[in-house]
Amino acid sequence: MRGGGVIASFIMTTLDGFFDGEKLWDLAWHRTDEEFNDFATEQLGEFDTLVFGRSTYEGMAQYWPSEEAMRTDPDVASRMNQAAKIVVSRTLHEPAPAWSNTTLVKDVQDLRTDKKLLVLGSALLTTSLLEEGLLDELRIMVNPVLLGSGRSVAGSARRPLPLKLLRRREFHNGNVLLTYEPDRNS
């Protein structure tokens, strides 16, 4: 932790380690239900600010303000839309105007703060934060499905990133939430 601040990351993955299928935003395999939605609402309430990499941000900014999101998951949509948000990108020039409360930062070092930050999705950003020693907690929700191919959670890692298991939680639909912290003694 840096000065009271915390940076955590939450990523949904398949049992074989993919966060996305062959096509961008191929997420049909996500196992979500009422128990998951309750967890998502609870998790959103733990943090001051949501953080995204550019690609995840663009997808989220397109979906959460939509009528479909408000219809299918009004509580999570409301929280996502009202939350303070940061997008980390060197290529984006300004945040999406339709998704309010968003600040653009160009470098992961700009995330050093006293606030509690939650990175959602954003595997590349999460890996960068781990490599820079800035991530305090990694929450991986493993869905009981095998894709066989796709984009790996840590496919961009330049070196092994040892983790220490803090806790696990099983969901009725077969999902398992694994919470790790970086093992800085390895």
Image (spheres, rainbow, N blue to C red):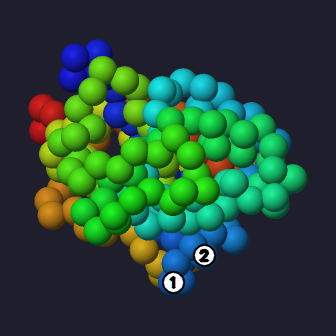
Residue 126 at what x, y percent from top left? 33, 51
Callout 2 secondary element: loop
- Residue 93 appears in which quarter of the rendering? bottom left
Residue 44 at what x, y percent from top left? 59, 33
| Nearer to us in this view, 59 or 37 | 59
Amino acid bearing label 2: Asp
Q: How crowded is mark 2: few (under 14 residues within 10 Å), some or many (20 or more)?
A: few
Residue hosting label 1? 22
* Quadrant in the picture for the N terminus: top left
Q: Is residue 127 left or right of residue 176?
A: left
Residue 85 in view, yes or no: yes
Residue 36 in view, yes or no: no
Residue hosting label 2? 26
Q: In this view, does 51 lie to the left or right of 5?
A: right
> Disc 1 to disc 2, how far (Cα)?
7 Å
Q: Are marks 1 and 2 in contact (CB under 8 Å)?
A: yes
Callout 1 secondary element: loop
Q: How crowded is mark 1: few (under 14 residues within 10 Å), some or many (20 or more)?
A: few
Question: Residue, x 31% and y 59% (percent of image)?
Answer: 89
* Quadrant in the picture for the C terminus: top left
Residue 148 at what x, y percent from top left? 52, 80
